[in-house]
Image (cartoon, rainbow, N blue to C red):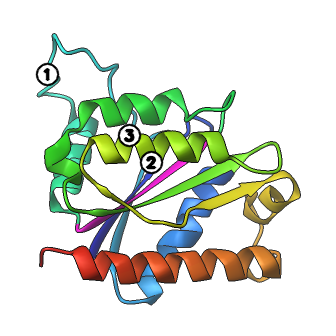
Amino acid sequence: MNIVIIAGSNRKEATSTRLSEYIQGLMKQAGNQVSLIDLYLSPVPFYSPDEDHEDHQGLAKLKQAMSEADAVVLATPEYHSGISGVLKNALDHLGQEHFEGKAVLSVSSAGGSVAVSSLTQLHTIVRNLHGINSPEWISIGGDQRKSFQTGVTPAEIQPNVENRIQRVVGSFLELAKLVSRK
């Protein structure tokens, strides 16, 4: 299965991006082809319905990857009870043709204990794009974020956090296989 992860932070050392890399590793271990689009490293232009940005390489890469994807993971930090502007901007460039009928896992990292507001927003966006929301999501917050700071190895991830992430990723992969058109 071909899975695309969009890490939607504009912070170099974002825990949501490190969490995305960990999820990518789990999905690859399960035999999937997984690409990670890090919006910090590959930013896209500001969305404007008046411009198509045909010549922007980062945007073309994002759209191509999404067109070829069987399933999608959207990862965001939670800022002021919402998704990052960087991720929202990237999603505004995409349409139903990139999400329709595909399983989507929502992932968030928050400074507080949980990131429910950003995850709820992602679910609403995915529904509007005709994607299929995974019934479970991944939210890390507070001390849990220490497991995904730069330099922390997978062996140092808090066991309860690791178990929850592995369970949710496994459940998502089952959903993705069920709804995949291939």
The image shows residue 71, relative to residue 78, as above or below, that is below
- Separation of marks 3 and 2 at Cα, in angstroms: 6 Å
- Secondary structure state at the residue bearing disc 2: helix
Q: Amino acid at mark 2?
A: His
Q: Is residue 8 visible?
A: no
Q: Which residues are magenta?
A: 70-77
Q: Which residue is mark 3?
A: 125
Q: Residues within 10 Å of mark 3 (few under 14, many from 20)?
A: some
Q: Nearer the viewer, mark 2 or mark 1?
A: 2
The answer to which of 117 and 155 lies nearer the viewer is 117
Q: Is residue 31 magenta?
A: no
Q: Position of residue 38 (x, y in %)?
A: 45, 48
The image shows residue 162, relative to residue 115, as above or below, that is below
The image quadrant that residue 165 belongs to is bottom right
Q: Amino acid at mark 3?
A: Ile
Q: Which residue is mark 2?
A: 123
Labelled pair 3, 1 in contact (Cβ < 8 Å): no
The image shows residue 143, relative to residue 34, as above or below, that is above
